């Protein structure tokens, strides 16, 4: 069986370092907001080319707290895409603001800057571009529009640790950015975790207060906050893993290039790496000609021992929970078509070359069987 991702193989490659880090925390007797979190905040912010990092409980909470710190709240509107993890939209709603959607570009799967302006109203406060699947959104035009309208930009970097836009790491281009350390992300903890990164010292201070009851000092709140803290164990593990992030992203890219080569002419479209950036292939997502093809290919791969997934099968504007936003089928045609046609193939740094070959052969074999079947029909 080739799984769509695997976390055990990676642990085996760093076992001694991780176990040592975990033991260090357990023996210290200090578990919340201590030296490990502080060190990791510094190290990860520096990795992004920034001066402040605030470790929080998850990627969702990083977005929630960053938006709160930017002053987003009830009555405001925040623009994002309907083709993303539901967490992006959940975080906007947690602030009391209303999510407003813009469709995605079919090549990059990220927000179309040209459609942004038509969605801006007097209530718009922020834009949340999502660097989906490991690829940066078109940040320059987004930041230009935001500046022109006085909006803030909160980058959702949950799938794009180390990805670049015009030579710079994502998270460092806008005023504030958010990462998730969910286990399967390019930099993943062994539990939940997230971080807000910024160069703005006062914004950083605000997030720092908000993540712990608004405490200015212990037991004294100067803001209405909540509890969202990265813990020492996760921070110690993430410090070990951060040292390997570039090498793991490189391994992902090597596997992506091999898929690209082997899947040429296979009947599915391979992902496009935009010329403005460096993709880190959190996911390797192919696109089928139509829904039945995708669903049958998925079953075919499972029957032959290859795991796949769909990121994401139901656009957020069509989900039950978000019906109150008032959108309908047909509102975001690119997003809706993608949801029917995309398929994520196995992708993780430890995936072996022969497994990429086997998966690609199966995709091709399915396609040629389809071709024969169609000929018989005719
Ligand atoms: C994973 C993810 C999140 C949320 O992160 P959690 O740590 O799971 O809360 C937000 N946005 C995107 C695009 C994600 O992929």
Image (cartoon, rainbow, N blue to C red):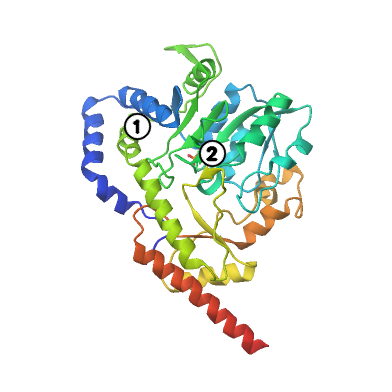
Apparent side of residue 114 relative to residue 288 in the rendered image (left or right): right
Q: Secondary structure at mark 1?
A: helix
Q: Residues within 10 Å of mark 2 (few under 14, many from 20)?
A: many
Q: Residues within 10 Å of mark 1 (few under 14, many from 20)?
A: many
Task: Work out whether residue 324 or residue 338 is closer to the camera in this orientation and state it.
Answer: 338
- Residue 297 in which image quadrant: bottom right
Q: Secondary structure at mark 2?
A: strand
**Residue drawn at point x = 63 percent, y = 86 percent:** 375
Task: Work out whether residue 224 or residue 238 is closer to the camera in this orientation and state it.
Answer: 238
Mark sitting on residue 364: none
Tell which circle, 2 or 1, labels the residue nearer the N-terminal end. Answer: 2
Q: Is residue 188 visible?
A: yes
Residue 354 vertical position relative to residue 183 in the rendered view, above or below: below
**Residue drawn at point x = 59 percent, y = 31 percent:** 154
- How many angstroms separate mark 2 from mark 1 (CA)? 27 Å
Q: Which residue is mark 1?
A: 235
Q: Quadrant of the N terminus?
A: bottom left
What percent of the width, then of the height, locates residue 296? 56, 72
Apparent side of residue 119 relative to residue 3 in the rendered image (left or right): right
Apparent side of residue 45 relative to residue 333 in the rendered image (left or right): left
**Residue drawn at point x = 70 percent, y = 23 percent:** 150
What percent of the width, then of the height, locates residue 30? 28, 24
Q: Which residue is mark 2?
A: 165
**Residue drawn at point x = 66 percent, y = 36 percent:** 141
């Amino acid at each position: 069986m080739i799984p769509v991702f695997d976390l055990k193989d990676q642990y085996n490659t760093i076992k001694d370092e991780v176990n040592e880090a975990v033991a260090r925390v357990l023996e210290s007797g200090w578990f919340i907001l201590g030296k490990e979190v502080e060190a990791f905040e510094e190290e990860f912010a520096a990795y992004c080319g920034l001066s402040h990092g605030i470790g929080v409980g998850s990627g969702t909470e990083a977005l929630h707290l960053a938006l709160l710190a930017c002053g987003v709240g009830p009555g405001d509107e925040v623009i994002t895409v309907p083709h993303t993890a539901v967490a992006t939209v959940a975080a906007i709603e947690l602030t009391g603001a209303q999510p407003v959607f813009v469709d995605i570009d079919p090549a990059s799967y990220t927000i179309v800057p040209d459609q942004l302006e038509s969605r801006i109203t007097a209530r718009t406060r922020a834009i949340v571009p999502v660097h989906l699947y490991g690829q940066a959104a078109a940040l320059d035009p987004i930041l230009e529009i935001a500046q022109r309208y006085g909006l803030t930009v909160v980058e959702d970097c949950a799938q794009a640790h180390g990805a670049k836009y015009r030579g710079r790491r994502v998270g460092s281009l806008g005023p504030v950015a958010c990462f998730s350390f969910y286990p399967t992300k390019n930099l993943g903890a062994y539990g939940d975790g997230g971080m807000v990164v910024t160069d703005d010292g006062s914004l950083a201070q605000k997030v720092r207060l908000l993540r712990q009851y608004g405490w200015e000092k212990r037991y004294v709140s100067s803001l209405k906050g909540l509890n969202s803290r990265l813990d020492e164990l996760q921070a110690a593990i993430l410090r070990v893993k951060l040292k390997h992030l570039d090498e793991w992203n490189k391994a992902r890219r090597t596997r992506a290039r091999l898929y690209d080569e082997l899947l040429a002419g296979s009947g599915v479209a391979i992902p496009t790496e935009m010329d403005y950036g460096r993709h880190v292939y959190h996911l390797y997502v192919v696109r089928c000609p139509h829904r039945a093809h995708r669903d049958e290919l998925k079953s075919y791969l499972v029957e032959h021992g290859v795991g796949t997934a769909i990121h994401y099968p139901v656009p957020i504007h069509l989900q039950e929970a978000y019906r109150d936003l008032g959108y309908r089928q047909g509102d975001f045609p690119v997003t809706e078509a993608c949801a029917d046609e995309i398929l994520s193939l196995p992708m993780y740094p430890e995936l072996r070359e022969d497994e990429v070959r086997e998966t690609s052969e199966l995709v091709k074999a399915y396609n040629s069987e389809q071709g024969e079947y169609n000929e018989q029909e005719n």
